[in-house]
Amino acid sequence: MVTMISRSVTILLGAVLLTLSPGLSPAAENQTPSGLKIQADTLTYDTPTDTYQATGNVELQWDGSTLFSDRASFQQSTGDAVATGKVRLLKEGNTLASESLSVNIESQKGEAENAELFYKQKNLYVKGRKLAKTGLGDYRLEQATFTTCDGPSPGWKFSAGKLDVTLDEYGTARNVLFYVKGIPLFYTPYLVFPVMRERQSGFLFPHIGSSNKKGFSFGIPYYWAVSPSQDLTVDLDIQSKRGAGLGIDYLYMGNAGNHGNLAAYGIYDTQERRGRGEVKLVQLQSVASSMIFRSDFDLTSDRNFLNDYGETTGVYNRQFLDSSASLSWRRQAYLADIEGRYADNLNAPNNRATLQRLPVVRFSAMPQQLLGAPLYAALDSEFTNFHRVDGSRGERFILNPSLSYYRTLPAGVDLAARGGYQLRLYDVNNAGAANGASGVGLGWANGSLSAPLERVYEVGHGELQRIRHTLVPEIDYAFTQERSQGNLPLFDYDDRPLGQQLLGWALTSYLTGRYGKAGAAPDYRELLFLRLSQGYQLAGSRRDLLNVVDDDRDRLTDLRLEMRAKPDPRLTVALDSRYNPNLGKISTANAGFDLTDGIGDTIGASYFYGRNSLNYIEGRLGLSLVKPFVFNYTPRYSFDKGNFLESLYALEYRQQCWSLNFSFQERPGNREFLVSFTLYGLGSFGKIKPF
């Protein structure tokens, strides 16, 4: 409760600061020597007291603020301004209404009696018998209530008999009550809390819950605002079935886009009688003007940790954890980097046979034009050290110089050609007949011809003014020299380039709409992307890492259809499928759509199919037809396994200033029910898991 109240007070005091601490500036007309503009039915000036008196429809203006009242006075010598009778102070959409308001423009001290404050940015309503600024950063509020709910009978509100606050230091509150529909639910006689105008350190809401695997759980998180660019959250997690755990989440933001996030969780699992945990680190850091360090680590103590403690969809059932760190250097047309990659196969009994790349060193020279001709030279090179405890290991060096040629032929036909020679050298051990030093060189080449065709159609239907249709027919050719490589080591597919000659064709269609209103800048939107492509194998063999190659004796490759459509801003459709014409069967298919009516109702689905590998669908449904309830349903169903991978049901009871959320999640090995209560503008009360 401490954190919520302290955030609320910070917002409230920011609004009071806007209204009670105006700085006066010169106005244009009807202004005092101090720059305060006054308009009223009757305006007088008393010379002995140096005071302006205004009565009847009084309006005072200064520095973007406007004050209305029945009566007002301003004493020039002391800087005291007093307004009474239906007082309203307006600034930047914020409103302060009170019976009386007084402020000293020199000391910036002042107070309002029987005041009602509306702070537009947070939809915050504050009422108090007295709102006073007693010093440069000191405030006092007496008999105050505050809420973000509209209407005379708010859904919730806080009240405090007295608040004393010093900005950037601490505040104290006495006799604090939390109400729901006028019914008091929580009381504390005294609170001490930090008050920061930006972020603030302090305890966050505790979390209470229960699950099949963890039993009853209770957590106490603490948030520490280390500096303007750093923060740290520490969470003590106590579980009846597993023991006591500790989580940390550290974030920092630096200059020039530098940033990092360290998240870790550790627990002594009393059920398994051992320590368990996970560490994640994502970082980007500029070492010099042309050098960048990147890291992305995800490491667990054991192979079942995510299955027992992972909560996010797609995490608890992962097969591989990949970690990497790299240092990159780029200058003009040259790029170099060194990278280490570590893979953890969670489905294997251990990681002894998992191939690691420690390190990978790359150097590239970007294409450089030769002698002013449309001919470009480039170089790619890579050194990889392969390591594992069980199995072959060693080094591989790849050197790949190339030449490229680009030219536009008559009739708008674009020609692109590229060729080179790849040299691979090895030094390996524990690889049987491939032990020792070896190598091979392969020539390769590819080229393409394309002829973009374009036409613009005038539409004039609603905001759609024009449609541009671009059609790009293309043919391409790829050649790789066929060489015997059976005596070479095999670490990955880069060690077995297949000798082949492949002729391909593609037809790509784009529809782009131009939308706009008279006098407004036009808006361009892609309506349709459609691409159909296929290849014909002239010689050699082929491999497709994204597809099943049924028989490389079939000359025709799969017919691939790619589509992305957005005929309406509310509808998105996507498709990527491959069809084997020799077998008359679909090889792979990824299809999905998302539709919304713009008022809170959504529906969508995605289907994933790979022949002999996967076959599942996931859905998305959101309904807000029966106000004030919002229902969401997200299932994932596996057709090949014949069961649901996961189902999530969520029901939200939504009011103007608060909501109550119920959700039920079911996945293999765990069921969880969740309840959360949110006060809009202030945050959530936390998560409660009854069963």
Image: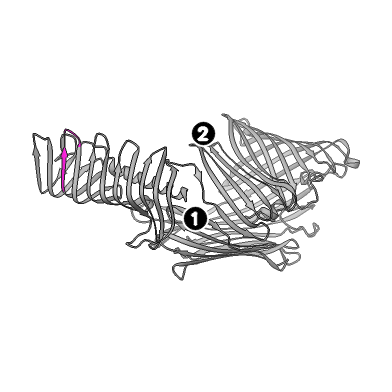
> Is 44 or 575 nearer to us in this picture?
44
Label annotation for residue 123: none
Q: Dot 2: what SS?
A: helix
Residue 6 covered by magenta stretch: no
Q: Dot 1: what SS?
A: strand
Residue 388: quadrant of the picture: top right
Image-based side of 651 in relation to 22, left or right: right
Query: Is 513 above or below relative to 373?
Result: below
> Three-letter amino acid code at disc 2?
Asn
**Which is in the foreground here, disc 2 or disc 1?**
1
Counting from the top left corner in percent of width and height, residue 5 is at: 43, 49
Image-based side of 328 in relation to 497, left or right: left
Extreme residue toward the bottom, this view: 626
Q: Earlier in the sequence, mark 2 or mark 1?
A: 2
> Three-letter amino acid code at disc 1?
Phe
> Is 178 or 33 nearer to us in this picture?
178
Q: Which residues are magenta?
A: 71-79
Label annotation for residue 255: 2
Image-based side of 486 in relation to 316, left or right: right
Residue 638 visible in image: no
Question: Who's the residue at 56% across and 49% down the image?
Answer: 220
Answer yes or no: do the residues labelled 2 and 1 have beta carbons within 8 Å?
no
Label annotation for residue 685: 1
Counting from the top left corner in percent of width and height, residue 34 is at: 18, 34
Question: Who's the residue at 49% across and 41% down the image?
Answer: 201
Extreme residue toward the right, this view: 433
Q: Calculate the distance from the C-alpha at mark 2 to the C-alpha at mark 1.
A: 34 Å
Counting from the top left corner in percent of width and height, residue 111 is at: 26, 44
Counting from the top left corner in percent of width and height, residue 198 is at: 43, 41
> Is 550 or 328 nearer to us in this picture?
328
